[in-house]
Amino acid sequence: MSYPRVAIAGTNSGVGKTTVTLALMAGLKARGRLIQPFKAGPDFIDPGHHQAVTGRPSRNLDGWMLGEAVNRRLFARTAADADLSIIEGMMGLFDGSSARHEKGSTAELAKQLNAPVMLVIDGSAMARSAAAMAAGYAKFDPALQVKAVLFNRVQSDGHFQLLKDAVEAETDLMVLGYLRPDASVTIPDRHLGLRTAIEQGQTDLYDRLARSAADTVDLDRVEALARSAGDFPIEAVTPIPISRSSSVRIGVAHDAAFCFYYQDNLELLQAAGAEIVKFSPLRDAAPPDVDLLYLGGGYPELYGEALANNSPMRSGIRAFAERGGALYAECGGLMYLTQAIRDGEGRQHEMVGLFQAETVMRKAGLTIGYRRVEVDQPCLLGQPGTLVRGHEFHYSLLQPTGELRYACTLSDADGRPIGQDGLTARNTLALYSHLHFGSAPDVVTTLVAAADRSRPRATFSGGV
């Protein structure tokens, strides 16, 4: 089966991959094309914008977290009905989990999917040097199909012609066009990345991006590049048996403060028989009547005052946990379950208070990297020895005010031990790590079973 596709890679972080990717998606959608978006690597913000543009959930693919076979199957399953797929890369083309190998990089993923690569270059301050840069990236790995170049932040057609002439004179790469620097199509940035699609709201940003692409990018050649992609093997596997439990309901926190979820995590839970019920810790008066609460990551530090002011929600979540209800939280969700969040201005905001700790926002000291999470004590993820893969990405720091219990140990992408994770209290598990359930689908069975077991004690209605 044909899967027209192209990987959008950058020479480095900050080159404008997301702007280019969204412009291409918007421009091709305006032509009536059905676009399936993907994101290389661990990321929640870019996929949200992808979905806002295309109307289809964006999927994360990752060589380190998921591996080749899972990446291929996930891609084929979700791209089958699309006219073409666009895969936004991460960082620079060859950047991944290590400086010594390609694991986790956009280059690795493009080879796994046999996808042609379009290289995004910031052309704002160069001319013939662009040819040297493009040639270097194209030749660095002969097994990789770097086929085309698109320039970003180019002021004029005259400047673009200089860049185009240089690249075409020195390489065999196609030059597909350029985008001008334009503040009106720039998504604001902050400490963890771009402003989220939820916060962006209903604006004409994506329409402006579509017009930008139509003006200065050869979209016919972009489509031809995607159609040039060859086949790739899809390994047949025996599905992991998932015990279905009827009527298990999982409440997923979803608003501007909590919006970091892998689409496939939610779908794996649904495949195991769970009904997903979304709610807002910012706006709703009480948690929904469910068997498990799932508090994902996001930006609770930016909404500390609103979360603190919604005391009925905080009390309801604490009561749910203290009754033995199953509660699973990641990063921002963990922060919400502590006694308080101290934001970047030093202001303290009272939170749920389930754990004897505060979380403090730092202006520096980013914690980032792939993580192996191994269960040491029985918990919502399973029995000791259970291994799940994910990543950490946060500026906050946990400051204990009393005793804390952990259920898991952490190691980095190379297997080096780096500490503990997974705060536990009764039937609650809260991690700083964001886990991808696709790396260990058995944990989905465990989570749904835990929700099923907790139902008689956890179900309630109304506020507290």
Image: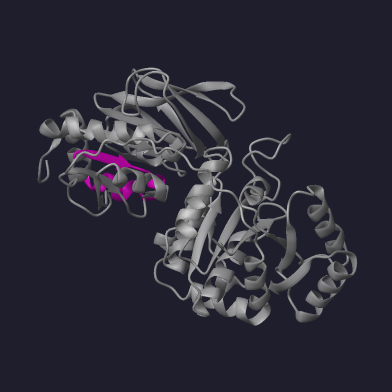
Q: Position of residue 252 (x, y in %)?
A: 29, 47
Taking 54 as reference, is 459 above or below it? above
Q: Nearer the viewer, residue 28 or 71?
A: 71
Q: Which residue lies at the image location 65% right of the left edge and 41% below the top edge?
A: 96
Q: Which residues are magenta?
A: 291-310
Q: Position of residue 183 (x, y in %)?
A: 59, 71
Taking 130 as reference, is 193 above or below it? above
Q: Position of residue 161 (x, y in %)?
A: 82, 77
Q: Is residue 311 left or right of residue 47?
A: left
The quadrant of the rendering that contains the N terminus is bottom right
* Coloring scheme used: one colour
Q: Is residue 326 visible?
A: no
Q: Which residue lies at the image location 36% right of the left edge and 17% below the top edge?
A: 377
Q: Is residue 109 left or right of residue 277?
A: right
- Number of numbered tags placed on the structure image: 0
Q: Is residue 426 left or right of residue 256?
A: left
Q: Which residue lies at the image location 81% right of the left edge and 72% below the top edge?
A: 164
Residue 122 sits in quarter: bottom right
Q: Which residue lies at the image location 87% right of the left edge and 69% below the top edge?
A: 166
Q: Position of residue 361 (x, y in %)?
A: 47, 39
Residue 297 among magenta residues: yes
Residue 228 sits in quarter: bottom right
Q: Is residue 32 visible?
A: yes
The quadrant of the rendering that contains the C terminus is top left
Taking 53 as reference, is 459 above or below it? above
Residue 146 among magenta residues: no
